[in-house]
Image (tube, helix red, strand yellow):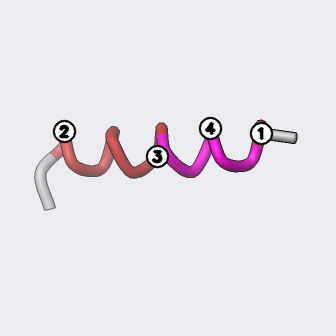
Amino acid sequence: MTVSEKYCHDNEFKTQEESP
């Protein structure tokens, strides 16, 4: 997994968690 992919996945997870 590339750094970009990891960053993308991390961002996705964060957005999902922060979403109400």
Find the distance from the CA under tag 2 to the CA under tag 4: 16 Å
Q: Residues within 10 Å of mark 2 (few under 14, many from 20)?
A: few
Q: Residue furthest front?
A: 20
Tell me whether the residue at label 1 lies in contact with that at label 4, contact meaning CB atoms closer than 8 angstroms: yes
Q: Nearer the viewer, mark 4 or mark 3?
A: 4
Q: Residue furthest bottom?
A: 1
Indicate the amino acid at tag 3.
Asp
Tell me whether the residue at label 2 lies in contact with that at label 4, contact meaning CB atoms closer than 8 angstroms: no
* Residue that numbered label 3 is attached to: 10
Q: Residues within 10 Å of mark 1 (few under 14, many from 20)?
A: few
Write the start and end of the magenta stretch as one range. 12-17
Q: For the residue labelled by badge 4, is the local secondary structure a helix, a strand or a loop?
A: helix
Task: From the top left corner, tell me how far across and down residue 19 is, in percent.
Answer: 77, 39
Find the distance from the CA under tag 1 to the CA under tag 3: 14 Å
Tell me whether the residue at label 4 lies in contact with that at label 3, contact meaning CB atoms closer than 8 angstroms: no
Find the distance from the CA under tag 4 to the CA under tag 3: 9 Å
Q: Is residue 17 left or right of residue 9?
A: right
Task: Identify the mark nearer the N-term, 1 or 2.
Answer: 2
The label on residue 19 is 1
The label on residue 4 is 2
Task: From the top left corner, tell me how far across and down residue 10 is, in percent.
Answer: 46, 46
Task: Identify the mark nearer the N-term, 1 or 3.
Answer: 3
Q: Nearer the viewer, mark 2 or mark 4?
A: 4
Q: Is residue 16 left or right of residue 9?
A: right
Indicate the amino acid at tag 1.
Ser
Residue shown at the point (57%, 51%) measured from the top left: 13
Q: Residues within 10 Å of mark 4 (few under 14, many from 20)?
A: few
Q: Nearer the viewer, mark 1 or mark 3?
A: 1
